[in-house]
Image (cartoon, coloured by chain):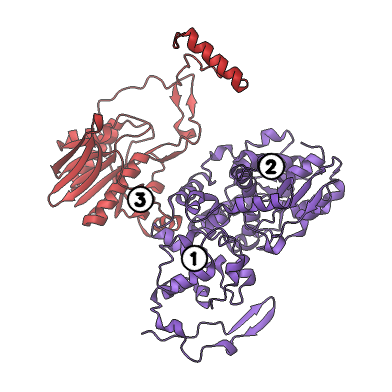
Chain colours: A purple, B red
Amino acid sequence: MQKAKPIELELAVVNGIELPGHWNRMFEPRVISEYDLSVLDQVTSIEGAESLGYCYQCGKCTAVCPVDTVGDYSPRKVFRRTQLGASLIDSPDLWLCTTCRNCLRVCPKEVNMIEIMPAVREQAVLEGKAPEELLTAFENTARYGNPLGEPPRKRADWVKAAEVPVPVMSQHKAPVDVLWFVECYPSYHPRGKDASVALARLFNALGIEFGILGTEEKCSGDSQRMAGEKGLFDMLAEHNIKMLSKYQFNQIVVTDPHAFNAFLHEYPKYGGEWPVQHYTQFLAPLIDQMNLTRPIPKKVTFHDPCYLGRHNGEYEAPRNLLKAIPELDLVEMGHCRETAYCCGGGGGGMWLDSFVRDYTSQRLSEKRVREAVEYGADILAVTCPYEVSRFEDAVKSTGNTGKLEVKDIAELLAYSAQLI
Amino acid sequence: MRILVLSKSVPDLVEELALDEDNGELLHDDMTYVPSEWDDHALEEALLLKEEVGAEVTVLAVDTGDVDNMLFTALAKGADHAVKLTGDFDLATSNRKRAQAIANYLRDNTFDLVLSGVQAIDDIDGQIPAIVAGLLEWPHASVVTEVSIQGEQIHFRQEYGGGLQAEFSAQAPLVLGIQAARKPPRYASIAKVRQMMKSSTVDEIDASADTVPELEIRRFFKPVAAGHAEMIEGDPEEVADRIITILKERKLVRG
């Protein structure tokens, strides 16, 4: 029988407040020491997954986990099952987390699924235990620089539809103010392209000096990293940093909150350090210059992207932009800001639709769309490229066609500025 | 059991084919190349055999340009050795010439079983395994599935018309053209591929090829459409009326 060892942090810092751990250290072995903890130890010995062992089963995460509301998954359950000897690497639990960060927001023990999931998933990918559809997305990203498997040479083809100049840096041969990192779905997905066209026209109308990488851009790779393909992320980060380093610009503006997260926290580790803003943050101070004259007399609700809001703390910029549109009535859903629900696309969820369907009663995107309808919204405004397609599909699959429209904030702004 | 897997890179159809329509030539340098899907299945079948009976797997490519990444990926998936046949080869090199170089290599190196993809999208002839076997006077079967090692025997299956299956047995050495592996080809994580690039090597073997009897390609071209389908537009009533009219015109309905 293995002897229990203290597993709590000596000192935890939560929201800047120091919480010494001495008062809750174990003085007597608890019931958990009667289990064979070897399976839990296997997981917590993986670099990055240590904090799973801190869980003391309070269940706060279960109350806020978006997956638990439609299925039987929460960080508390992950810990408990692992403690009882069920292998996480072989469990569907490993692929259900969308890394939305709501659990970490409330966890008193800082059990960090944002680090645990990618670490354990990486192990599973190495052992060949990842779902097939996810591997297809990895392979597409490795081969084509985008998870959709679209031709890399056509990455900038969307600009034709913009009908305004969208300079590609390799041909532009001059410094720009803003390097716009477009990302994959805004380059290839039909509805993503709509938002890119809208944003390109807004940039032109505002007289922004900007350029894109075009075919030199590859996926930022952040979601692939969260889904367990660290090596792929390394490769993509090195490539993008190399391409970006060729050009002169003052700052990066991204369409995608996942790319935002990568540029803020990960790319600097690889030597790629530039000021970066999400496009809503970039546009919010320019509201007065945007000529938002055409009213949108609709009830609009906003879905906070996990990687813009909870991960990176930006809740105001998208709302300020929406409020600047004449006659637009912004209504908040119950789950908003820090407590926003998740669209289900993060952490690899974008490429696990069939897999996740087997373990959930409805898609997270469907649950969210039902909430938007419940609050009487005519338009669900989004600002993450995963969301337009996910929520539009969910509008159809929940039978709400005609009741709720899904629009990227860029589309709403361009419409109000009479640019589309 | 020593297994040799033949691998080849083929134009990536995700990008448009680069075709010079005037001269009827494929512009190989303007296309991107990816491992042939059928060869990936041959490799998967070999790796499954390795897991089952402990075979040693070598993956081989004729050096037609950028094949290193393909070979390192095979090593990352679990192949033991990688070999590149260098010489007077390029992306347009015929299967006949490739087969000759591979057969020469097999004369100098001992293998029990050679697995190749049944064909490739840029030949659709399945000649490489057949010619290799012919040149070496080894037995050969094509469009094969479910290879297994049973003691001294190699068993495998072929499927015939009418859903009839045949199971064969053969003695090594043997060449097989694999239609599909028992499992989907495995994924090699990028970290592993990159690690292989640092820690392992591809053996380069000089394989100056002999003169071989070859065909000449006169031209490549896209088929000319002979006719077009009629798209019937309108509301459901109109579409239904039009369909009924067409069926009546062609005398496909009575009355």
Marks 2 & 1, CB-CB < 8 Å contact: no
| Element class at badge 1 | helix
Q: Nearer the viewer, residue A392 or A115?
A: A392
Chain holding disc 1: A
| Element class at badge 3 | helix
Q: Is residue A213 above or below residue A225?
A: above
The tag on residue B74 is 3
Task: From the top left corner, tell me how far across and down residue B160 is, in percent.
Answer: 23, 31
Three-letter code for the amino acid on which mark 3 is drawn:
Ala
Q: Nearer the viewer, residue A338 or A329?
A: A329
The answer to whether marks 2 and 3 sit on the same chain is: no
Q: According to the image, label 2 marks what residue?
A: A196
Of the numbered discs 2 and 1, the one sitting upstream in the chain is 1
Q: Residues under labels 1 and 3: Cα distance?
A: 24 Å
Quarter of the view holding residue B91: top left
Q: Residue at x 46, y 73 (%)?
A: A44
Using residue B242 as the reference point, say whether residue B49 is left or right of it. Answer: left
Quadrant placement of the C terminus of chain A = top right
Three-letter code for the amino acid on which mark 1 is drawn:
Ala
Q: Residues under labels 2 and 3: Cα distance?
A: 38 Å
Chain holding disc 3: B
Task: From the top left corner, tell me how far across and down residue B20 is, in percent.
Answer: 49, 24
| Element class at badge 2 | helix
Q: According to the image, label 1 marks what residue?
A: A119
Using residue A59 as the reference point, say whether residue B165 is left or right of it. Answer: left
Chain holding disc 2: A
Please name which of the two marks, 1 or 3, marks the residue nearer to the observer. Answer: 1
